[in-house]
Amino acid sequence: MKKVVTFGEILARLSTKQGERLTQAKQLQLNYGGAEANVAISLAQFSHETSFVSKLPDHALGKGVMHYLKSLNISTAEIQYGGERLGTYYLEVGAGNRGSQVVYDRKYSSFSSLTIEELNYDAIFENAYLLHVTGITPALSANMVEVVEQLFSEAKSRGVLISFDFNYRAKLWSQKQAGTVIKRLLPYVDICSCAELDMIYLLNYPKLPDELGYEEKLRQYYRQLKNDYSNLQWCMSTRRENSSASQNKLTGYLYSDEGLYQSEVYHIDHIIDRVGGGDAFVAGILHGLIHQWEPNAIVSFATAASVLKHTIHGDANLITEAEVINMLSHGNQISR
């Protein structure tokens, strides 16, 4: 199985019980999570060899993260120890018409202090087929922008495919800052996860008329993106329609030179945990691309994997390939 490397920060997540606000909570549930780690974990469940590259504090919380990753068959050989803080985020779990809210506490974390000199590229990329990073990572500091670009340059020089998820977080940086950095990184990228609003507000593409319909607008945006960055091979995104915090509709999309491929529309009822759903979709796409499946099969698998993530507490999608395939055969789907 081909090796996948992911690079980013893993955080302690402290969540309220459903129905409680952070201002009233007296107990919080601890989980670990982070976009790149979530992708690595999901791919490990699909039997891929995965390596997570990061930096952790050398104390009990850092060791707790290491135990967590190792228990899920993630290689931690390239995780550095240093600094004093594990980044944290607080999740107020939504219900009904009240959406979930996130409060970050990650400044001056161990990971944000990581430097280019600490990375051993020969070890990181040994036998690697693909590198995955999200826009959350360069959003953490100006230094991290340089680290990510150098990592991309090294990957490209070694023939390693690069997957990049825009994953814009307004609480971490502005649209202008994100757009500038993303445009700087895109020339290295082979596989890209970005949606309609990303292309309008981060890449400054002109807004297309709604009369075109969602799929046609997405097709035109992706066509322009690939024209601007000819290195891009695949583009992906999901469309989420929210009825409430516990009921959504989800559709997946995958684009290549051959056209736009769309999954079935899934109605997700009684959401347990939405966090990590996008990472589960990305992992499903990467799984299918690595196996060179047909595009329709890839986007169907990835969307079903994301739907299943919504039924699991925590950030990680602890679902096997067989379970996703079983859902595709017997799951509740809404025809287009």
Image (tube, rainbow, N blue to C red):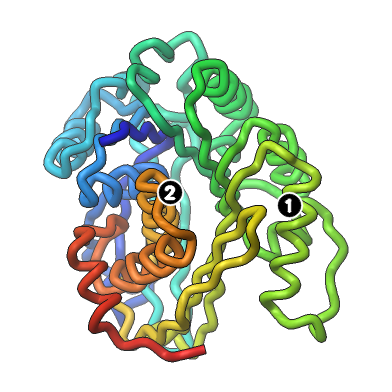
- Callout 2 secondary element: helix
User: What amino acid type should be assigned to the residue bearing mark 1?
Assistant: Gln
Residue at 31% from the left image edge and 31% from the top image edge: 3
| Percent position of residue 220, x then y | 77, 65
Mark 1, other Cα within 10 Å: few <14 / some 14–19 / many ≥20: some
- Callout 1 secondary element: helix
Please tell me which of labels 2 and 1 falls first in the chain.
Answer: 1
Q: Is residue 226 above or below residue 160?
A: below
Q: Which residue is mark 2?
A: 289
Q: Is residue 50 left or right of residue 139?
A: left
Q: Nearer the viewer, mark 2 or mark 1?
A: 2
Point out which mark residue 112 bears: none
Residue 94 lies in quadrant: bottom left
Residue at 39% from the left image edge and 35% from the top image edge: 6
Q: What is the CA distance from the residue labelled 2 to the residue labelled 1? A: 30 Å
Residue at 26% from the left image edge and 74% from the top image edge: 311
| Percent position of residue 241, x then y | 54, 82
Q: Is residue 223 left or right of residue 333?
A: right
Q: Is residue 154 above or below residue 35?
A: above
Q: Which residue is mark 1?
A: 175
Residue at 74% from the left image edge and 45% from the top image edge: 179
Q: Is residue 281 left or right of residue 174?
A: left
